[in-house]
Image (cartoon, grey):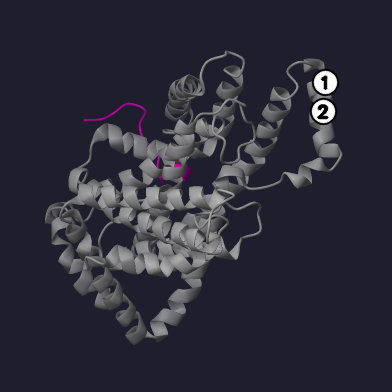
Amino acid sequence: MMQGRFQVSGMGPMATVLERHREFQPPRALRVRSFRYHSLDALRGTMMLLGIYLHAGVAFSSRGSWPWKDGSTTVVFDLSLGLIHVFRMPVFYVMAGFFAALLLEQRGQADFLRNRVVRILLPFAAGWAVLFPLVAALVTAATNLEEPWTIPVKYLQFFSSGEVWRHVDPMHLWFLEYLLIFYAIALAVIPLARRRPTLVAKVERTFRAVLISPLGPLILAAITFPVLCFMEEGGLDDPSGFVPEWKIVITYLVFFASGWLLYRNADLLPTLRRLPRLPIVLVLGLAAALLGFYCLWRLAQSTASHPHLWFLGSAWFLGLSMWLFIFGFTGLFLRYLERPVPWIRYLSDSSYWLYLMHMPVILVFQIAVAGTGWTPAVKALVVLAASAPTLLASYHVLVRSTWVGAILNGRRYPVRWRP
């Protein structure tokens, strides 16, 4: 959603840091133009697209909340959706912090604020105003298919009776609300940080040491662990309403701040890309996640001994898994997607719109396959196969070259590719 260029002159201490970006800077002749972190932008877009898979499958899982549940479930989605939930939003918020720091440095506080209002606050408010009544209509229709003539009446009763207030929440758009909170915190902290340059320098030195240390994931997991202990299962909770929950704010703020510091020390990106044995890091993350799930399983057993220890084990292993995945995925994308790939760039650009609008599309196809008698896995695959081209077509026709695309992507793109 964002792109920027390096500005070394006039940056004070940051000039030294940015001058060490040699491996990630474009040729000198091109530095007057915007420089895009294609790899990290693709990573952020991938995390958003994984959310579509997550919501396509959650209707057929015994876990997770969704406006409409199919009733037939499979353990395949219980495991895969649980695993994606461990790392998807942590990785996303690290990338969000990285690009927020880039945008602030590139444009200054006033333009940063205007940009975030247009590209985050406006889609959040307008998207919710459109999607909430639409999703309510779909759920009302799905639960009254046997008596279709009652659907309009029950839909109106849902709003007129006041029942709607029990269901008002930000839906899948909650991540935008928390992004706005983090932007506000960042803008409030910046004036204080300028008055404490010594403290800021110490924080950045510490972060650099942690980032390049083999024990980096362990140290960062130790920071995340205490807050995860306040979560329901020692993992990541989702917000239940518009009122921000302090434990969720603090947890994701750690990831956001880490991304912010990563940009402030972006000369270390080549270090992450050259991180030895990246597949092993991801395997360790998977192993830690499975250990966390095992602790949850033991905790759920009525005969489990020492339930508090199993809960603490779940919080520790899931927290460690989050940071191992962050290190592993960031390094892999930096290593293999540093150069732009047209179709990946297209998907990265489209991911914001696709994620904003996917809920009603997914629900329509989930409701359509409900009575087919297919297995849950087949239903989910059909839902994905139908939803993906529908959403991409809507982006290509309604967004990419229109004013909506100017809001979401920061510019209008031509409908056809140019050489």
Residue at 59% over, 18% down: 368
* Mark 1 and mark 2: Cα distance apart in space: 6 Å
* Magenta residue span: 405-419
Instruction: Say which quadrant the C terminus sits in.
Output: top left
Q: Secondary structure at mark 1?
A: helix
Residue 384 percent location from the top left of the image = 46, 25
Residue at 47% over, 64% down: 253
Q: Determine if residue 167 is in view.
A: yes
Circle 2: residue type: Lys
Identify residue for label 2.
Answer: 154
Residue at 51% over, 69% down: 185
Q: Image height check: is 312 above or below 331?
A: below
**Quick check: 93 left or right of 302?**
left
Identify residue for label 1.
Answer: 150
- Picture quadrant of residue 319: bottom left
**Quick check: 362 left or right of 342?**
right
Circle 2 crowding by C-alpha within 10 Å: few under 14, some 14–19, many from 20: some
The prevailing secondary structure element of the residues shown in magenta is: loop
Residue 57 percent location from the top left of the image = 50, 31
Q: Are marks 1 and 2 in contact (CB under 8 Å)?
A: yes
